[in-house]
Image (spheres, grey):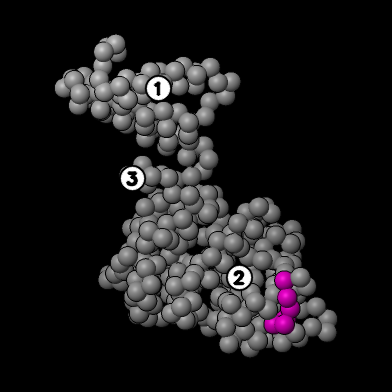
Amino acid sequence: MPDDLQPDVLRLELTELGDAFRAYQRRPEPDLAVLAELHDRKARAFALWADVTDDASLREEAVRAEAAARTTREMSANRLGIEVDVGGRVVERLLTRGQGAHARGVLEHVRAHSPLPGAEARLAVLMLTLRAARAGIGNVTGQDLSGWLQGDAERVLQELVDVGWLRLPEEVEAADALESRPEEPTQVTVPSLLPAETRPITFGKVTRARLSGWAQKVVGDRKLRKKKARAATRLLAVYTAAHSRPDGRLAERIEGAASDGLGLDVVASFCALRPEDIAEHAELLVAVGWLTEADTARGKLRGRLGERVLPLSGLV
């Protein structure tokens, strides 16, 4: 670096940057986030230096520093289980890839084993399954139930009890469960999820809590609530979030590879709809910004999650 380099602020930045890189090399443990910031600073400083001196080699060095910053940030994100989009921006996901796979497993279990045909019951079965996934027992409040099912909560809860899929504590009726508060929730039992030799769902405590929170964020999405979206629409929101790539494109795994779009028959089966009804509910998701686009031609639902929804992607 020339001693007479102008402007002074550039000479000072380059001096401080050299000191910062040397200090980083002396660190006992690497910190990739810090290193990425240093590469960013180097890229900006060398680009300005190239502008001042019209030196092509300095401009090439700035480009290399930009690439190093991207690569370092991607390495840091991979270590933390965070996805980076094509522009190099970090998108903080609620689920890891493994948890996304578990989420899809739960959705398939619910699709195949839901005891009642309607969308309201299907939504209740999904949310209650996630609450009771590990031990067959979970806690719910009246606010949970009314948030999931609105005016149908008591009816749906009672129907699930009547068919034996759900058990409430002795002397607790469905109406009582709707009155339960966070400080004294109702403990519910799902007999099919009780520990046995073969368990339909197997994952740990942290994953269960993460999946339950993920589904709650989807079902309770503010814009979906504002539009008073029906149970089938919210089920479709859950399904599209779970079956999307890091860039938001809808996809499903077939023989280990991610395909383009989702089969309408399977989507409809999960949402308790007819395949020809999916388009209507997909359009509602587009209207609230859940999807940026949706196409149901040729037996597939194709589309992309909106940017605000990307953190909920299941990372197919």
Mark 1 element type: helix
**Residue 162 pos. (x, y %):** 70, 86
Q: Nearer the viewer, mark 2 or mark 3?
A: 3
- Which mark is first along the chain, 3 or 1? 1
Question: Mark 3 — residue?
Answer: 86
**Residue 230 pos. (x, y %):** 48, 81
**Residue 197 pos. (x, y %):** 74, 58
Is residue 88 rendered to the left or right of residue 159? left
**Residue 242 pos. (x, y %):** 47, 60
Q: Residues within 10 Å of mark 3 (few under 14, many from 20)?
A: few
Q: Amino acid at mark 2?
A: Met
Question: Mark 2 — residue?
Answer: 127
Q: Amino acid at mark 3?
A: Val
Residue at mark 1 to residue at mark 2: CA–CA distance: 52 Å
Q: Are marks 2 and 3 in contact (CB under 8 Å)?
A: no
The residue drawn where x is 48% and y is 45% is 82
The magenta span reads 177-182
Q: Nearer the viewer, mark 1 or mark 2?
A: 1
Q: Amino acid at mark 1?
A: Leu
Residue at mark 2 to residue at mark 3: CA–CA distance: 33 Å
